Image (cartoon, grey):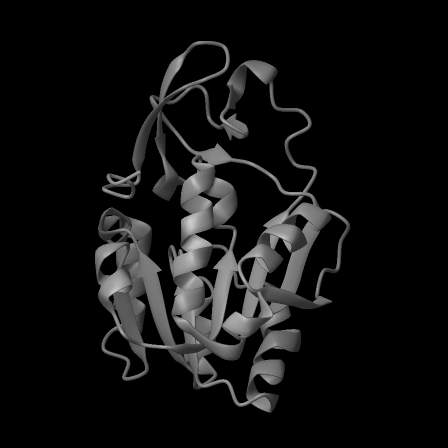
Amino acid sequence: MAAIWKSPIYTLQSKSGKRITIDVASSVSAGLPPNKIFHDVLIKLFRENGVETIVDFGAGALRHTIPLLKAGFQVCAVEFEEQYKKSACAEAMAKVGNHHNFCKLIWPSDFKKDDHRFDAGLLCYVLQTMPIKEERELVLKILRKKMRDDSFLLWMSRYGQLDRIPKDQAVRDGFFMSPERDTHSFYTEFPTEATHEMMGKHGFKRLRSLSERGTEQVFLYQRKSSTWI
């Protein structure tokens, strides 16, 4: 796995034998408003618990970075360099401008070398778009090292969205999307208990669910010390 993350582009073979190209950065949905959980619950919770620094991993078009900046937090957005060059991300970056509480880090090189430690992290619709299981595991391992003991990690995903996807779009442990295109996005799902097990394996203990709908997974975890694992 020495060559992982050189770019967001993957060439894989679907289970039907088709050779496909996946761009994990293509899963970003520009123009979506921030999840209401941020204004209704999360910002208050972070303030009450002394959170100051937040890492938005897989920040995309800064959908959740911007409201946290407006709320007064220091936020670091992490993305592929190719993602930052796309129009949706470039427009969002222009809105942020030179905000004194904002920084960006290129994944993986800058993020792995950076020595910041964070009070909270966001994983919003990120690991589900990554087609290589080993890379998801490494993301959690590296992210954990960047977070302080007792820091918070917000997980957001959906479940039950793939039932009607044709089986010939199966690849790895998920599906490639937009079959009419030359380059595809990828999506997989993790049942609730599998999500908690994966997070627990990497030292994140579940605190509570913030979900409002049955198909929505919004979980708050806390990073424990290395002696807890």
Which picture quadrant has residue 2?
Answer: top left
Which picture quadrant has residue 48?
Answer: bottom right
Looking at the image, residue 216 sits to the left or right of residue 3; the answer is right
Seen from this angle, which residue lies furthest right? 214
In the picture shown, does residue 1 fall above or below 18?
below
In the rendered view of the protein, which quadrant contains the C terminus? bottom right
Residue 78, position as x, y percentages in the image:
33, 61
> Image point 28% across, 73% down: which residue?
103
In the rendered view of the protein, which quadrant contains the N terminus? top left
Residue 132, position as x, y percentages in the image:
43, 36
In the picture shown, does residue 109 fall above or below 169?
below
Is residue 223 visible from the viewing direction of this image?
A: no
In the picture shown, does residue 72 fall above or below 64?
below
Residue 76, position as x, y percentages in the image:
34, 71
> Image point 47% across, 38% down: which residue?
133
> Image point 53% across, 21% down: which residue?
170
Q: Give 67 or 102, whichever is nearer the viewer.
A: 102
Residue 180, position as x, y percentages in the image:
43, 19
Q: Give 84 or 147, whichever is nearer the viewer.
A: 147
